[in-house]
Image (cartoon, rainbow, N blue to C red):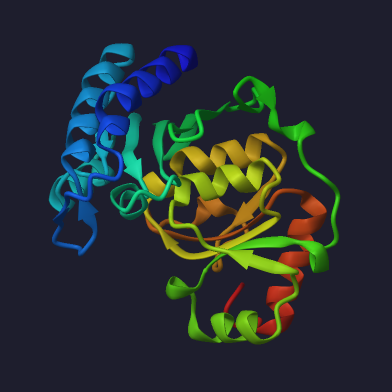
Amino acid sequence: MIKEIKEAVKMVSTEEIMPHFSEGKFGIKPDGSLQTSADLAAQKKLQNILQDIYPAPFLGEEMSTFEQKRLLSSANEFLWCVDPIDGTSNYVNGIPYFAVSVALMKKGRTLIGVVYDPAREEMFSAEVGGGAYLNGVELLQRRKVKSIDHAIAQIDFKRLPPKISEVLLLNPPYRSQRNFGAGALEWCYLASGRFDIYIHGSQKIWDYAAGSLILSESGGCLRTLGYGDFWQDPSWSKSVVAANRPEMFDAWVSWLKNMDSTIIQ
């Protein structure tokens, strides 16, 4: 099944997404985020293809909030969770950092995750128990051993509690930080060793569904600010604390707890 998903994602990217890259035409959704005709066309085509691959309900980032909440509150055993263009602001402005994210979930947990960066032609993928891969190469073999003071961090400051943001800006434990604006790819860059640690104040399910599995299957670790087990957090919008190796994760969580034990439980 994962081969069929990857083929579908690549085809839709070629036909619906890349021909309109950097055109600059967009609309504004009720939540203030951008939407393009490519988002809508790619989501529609992915829904048709994916439901032919496996006939599960389909949750798309471009659906109405009402329809998204209806699907998330329904007792669906299986669910497709898709963001047709993660990083639409980058896509509209000609910044080559965006991706297609597809996950097949069962009872709220991801079974298969695929994230495709069509600008770089990088296909990240994972299945539960099957490892994580970038263009067929296992991600577990790509990372270098570092201490946290040499780490590159992926930080989304605007959604973090103000106290965490202030301390990270003034006295960070890592060497440097980045924020590129596409959540699904951020998970994959962490899994591949391009980033070492990660913190995000709130991600929607289509931001983390595929990427979190790719990180886990690559040997990385994750939690939320409030829960030691990422998947025990009952919210569909979750904060993220993660690292690409267990020892880096322990050091990152320990630093956050020492900084303020009331913020991270």
* Numbered-mark total: 0
In the depicted structure, whether residue 151 falls above or below residue 216: below
Give the x, y percent position of residue 213: 56, 38
Q: Horizontally, is 144 left or right of 12 in the view? A: right
Residue at (64, 22) in percent of width and height: 130
- The quadrant of the rendering that contains the N terminus is top left
Q: Is residue 185 left or right of residue 176?
A: left
Q: Quadrant of residue 212?
A: top right
**Closer-to-camera residue (96/231):** 96
- The quarter of the image holding the C terminus is bottom right
On the image, the x and y values in percent for residue 83 come to 33, 40
The one nearer the camera, 77 or 152, is: 152
Left or right relative to 30: residue 214: right
Q: Looking at the rendering, which quadrant does residue 159 occupy? A: bottom left
Residue at 78%, 51% in the rendered image: 246
Residue 180 position, x and y percent, is: 49, 57
Q: Residue at x 58, y 27 (%)?
A: 128
Residue drawn 55% across and 80% down?
Answer: 165
In this picture, is 183 found above or below 153? above
Residue 92 position within the rendered picture, expressed as x and y whole percent measured from the top left: 28, 50
Q: Using residue 250 as the reference point, say whether residue 190 is left or right of it.
A: left
Residue 62 image-quadrant placement? top left
Above or below for 98 versus 147: above
Nearer-the-camera pick, 169 or 31: 169
